Amino acid sequence: MKVLVIGAGNMGLTYAEGMSKSKLLKKKNIMVLDKSEEKLEALHQIAHFDAFNELKDCVPDADIIFIAVKPYHAESVFKAMKPYVQPQQIVVSIMAGVTINSIKELTGLTKIVRAMPNLPAQIGEGLTSYVISPEISRIEMLTVESLLDTTGKSIRVSSENFIDASTGISGSGPAYVFYFMQSMMEAALQMGFSKNDSTVLVSQTFTGAVALFNQSNLSPNSWMEKVASKGGTTRAALDSMQDNNVNELIKEAAFAAFNRAVELGKAY
């Protein structure tokens, strides 16, 4: 089996590197295409990749084609691919908003996987939600899932609506965490901590809290109740957040990302 990754940006290379460790693929079974001469030069230095800059030289040989370009390049890339594709090939798109039907129409292929990864995939801790077209068999689905899992975890969803929804939760979610971390670090600095100490205080607090959550069956609300005693410091902080409607503001932010993903889909 040979895999082609089109687009050697951060996410494209993340998947290429992850898949290079998969037991499903042997060395030199990963092809990477990019038009940038600088990126091609770097790719040629990686022994386990075959680098290309022309679709005709790699698309016909691929069993699975990962599309990792910006959504506004979708139409031009798919139209350029179309003369070289084979009916049995599987396309895995990680482009926000580009629908399965659009990919079918632009490529002429029917076996399509639409996926939404997130940034922690770069360190093998990502979450990728994905949906498949009806033409993909169970064995093909499991193969694709195994490849997606090389960058963390994956979940199969039942419709493209959930891909857009997961954009608002997991896809954009790391930025929400970073936003919260930045606010806490600024508060620590204002309290007089050094920049280094502020960073350690906040990062380890997040690391520890997530570890606690993952090692139990308790809900976030239950953990908050464990930490927040009546009249105590944590309760004062949580009451402040509640008074300022932080819960609803966070949900509104997630829906804003979700709605934007839907809007992007209407363009393709």
Image (spheres, rainbow, N blue to C red):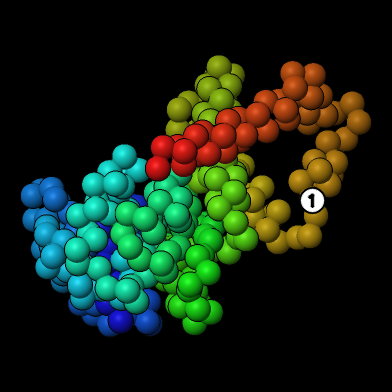
**In terms of depth relative to the viewer, which is nearer, 62 or 128?**
62
Quadrant location of the C terminus in the rendered image: top left
Q: Seen in the image, is 34 located left or right of residue 213?
A: left
Location of residue 14 in the rendering, given as x and y in whole percent from the top left corner: 34, 58
Using the image, determine if residue 22 lies above or below residue 102. below
For image coordinates 73% across by 30% down, the residue present is 247
* Visible residue check, residue 123: no
Location of residue 141 in the rendering, given as x and y in whole percent from the top left corner: 49, 74
Q: Seen in the image, is 73 located left or right of residue 111?
A: left
Location of residue 47 in the rendering, given as x and y in whole percent from the top left corner: 16, 71
Q: Quadrant of residue 158?
A: bottom right
Using the image, determine if residue 45 lies above or below residue 78. below
Q: Seen in the image, is 93 located left or right of residue 248?
A: left
For image coordinates 32% across by 54% down, the residue present is 106
Quadrant location of the N terminus in the rendered image: bottom left
Location of residue 231 in the rendering, given as x and y in whole percent from the top left corner: 89, 26
Count how many numbered circles sit on residues in the image. 1
Q: Seen in the image, is 28 located left or right of residue 40?
A: right
For image coordinates 38% across by 82% down, the residue present is 23
Which residue position is annotated with label 1?
219
**In terms of depth relative to the viewer, which is nearer, 72 or 177?**
72
* Visible residue check, residue 128: yes
Residue at the right extreme, as displayed: 230
**In terms of depth relative to the viewer, which is nearer, 46 or 82?**
82
Q: Amino acid at mark 1?
A: Ser
Q: Quadrant of residue 256?
A: top right
